[in-house]
């Protein structure tokens, strides 16, 4: 079964420095039908004004990922890590026993757009950790490039979650598929453009839950950038403090 969530159905968050779209309940946007999916807790699309950002805040027992779409994101945390995360970069943190961090637009002139992703960890109370890597466009062109996995296979960043995340760029006749060797759920998020997911056309900001499907196939892309989350075959767990 494939269940579509259109871009315009997402929650909206606005501040004088932030334009955000919430796939799942977050902050003032609360929808009992949209509290996550399997181990995927949060998927926010944030556009942050120049020089602004999220002040220091804390996380615990959550796998945190930032996927930068455009611009530059400045990261600082209580582990002593600090970096600028640019388009094509992926930042991952295991919050574990607890971390604090901040995320700011590194530019004083241009906005930064990025996806905030939270995933339930496979074990609680782990030691906090951080990693970052650039995934160039050629690794994603016409294929599914592994970004995050529990074993770090095929060049993916390691995280403590029973979930694999892939990114792909598709145009024209380019196509790719992922088949599941066991029952799994999946979530698809279209970052840019449009494409067909198992024969259903999705456009920018659209998402889809997949349950009981043998796999996921992408085709018919028009300047499309897409993320695929390969998730445990279970429904949304009880909400946890991130």
Image (cartoon, rainbow, N blue to C red):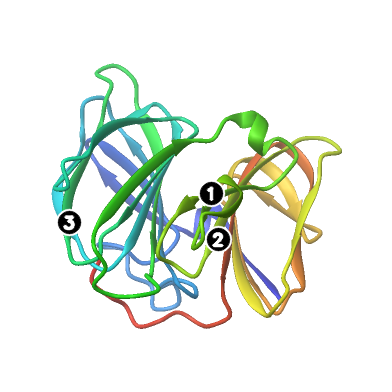
Q: Disc 3 to disc 1, how far (Cα)?
A: 23 Å
Could you classify mark 1 by the number of other residues whose Cα lies within 10 Å: few (under 14), some (14-19), or many (20 or more)?
some
- Say the numbered circle drawn on residue 156: 1
Q: Position of residue 5 (x, y in %)?
A: 57, 63
The quadrant holding residue 80 is top left
| Closest to the observer, 84 or 128 | 128
> Which comes sooner in the sequence, label 2 or label 3?
3
Residue at left 77%, top 73%?
A: 214
Q: Disc 2 to disc 3, how far (Cα)?
A: 23 Å
> Which comes sooner in the sequence, label 3 or label 1?
3
- Say the numbered circle drawn on residue 99: 3
- The reply, left or right, for residue 232 in relation to residue 57 is right
Q: Position of residue 200 (x, y in %)?
A: 76, 59
Q: Would residue 218 be seen by someone viewing this image from the given angle?
A: no
Total numbered labels: 3
Q: Position of residue 225 (x, y in %)?
A: 62, 40
Could you classify mark 3 by the number of other residues whose Cα lies within 10 Å: few (under 14), some (14-19), or many (20 or more)?
many
């Amino acid at each position: 079964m494939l269940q579509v969530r259109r871009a315009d159905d997402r929650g909206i968050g606005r501040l004088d420095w932030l334009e955000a779209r919430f796939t799942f309940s977050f902050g003032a946007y609360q929808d009992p039908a949209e509290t996550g999916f399997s181990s995927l807790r949060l998927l926010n699309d944030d556009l942050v004004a120049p020089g602004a950002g999220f002040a220091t805040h804390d996380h615990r027992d959550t796998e945190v990922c930032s996927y930068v779409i455009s611009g530059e994101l400045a990261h600082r945390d209580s582990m002593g890590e600090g970096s600028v995360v640019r388009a094509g970069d992926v930042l991952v943190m295991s919050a574990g026993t607890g971390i604090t961090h901040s995320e700011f637009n590194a530019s004083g002139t241009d906005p930064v757009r990025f996806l905030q992703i939270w995933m339930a960890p496979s074990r609680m109370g782990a030691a906090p950790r951080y990693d970052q890597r650039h995934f160039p466009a050629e690794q994603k062109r016409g294929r599914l490039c592994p970004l995050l996995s529990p074993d770090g296979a095929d060049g993916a960043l390691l995280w403590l979650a029973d979930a694999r995340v892939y990114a792909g760029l598709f145009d024209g006749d380019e196509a790719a598929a992922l088949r599941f060797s066991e029952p799994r759920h999946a979530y698809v998020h279209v970052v840019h453009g449009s494409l067909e997911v198992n024969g259903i056309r999705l456009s920018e900001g659209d998402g889809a839950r997949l349950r009981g499907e043998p796999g996921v196939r992408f085709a018919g892309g028009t300047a499309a950038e897409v993320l695929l989350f390969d998730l445990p075959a279970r429904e949304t767990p009880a909400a946890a403090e991130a």
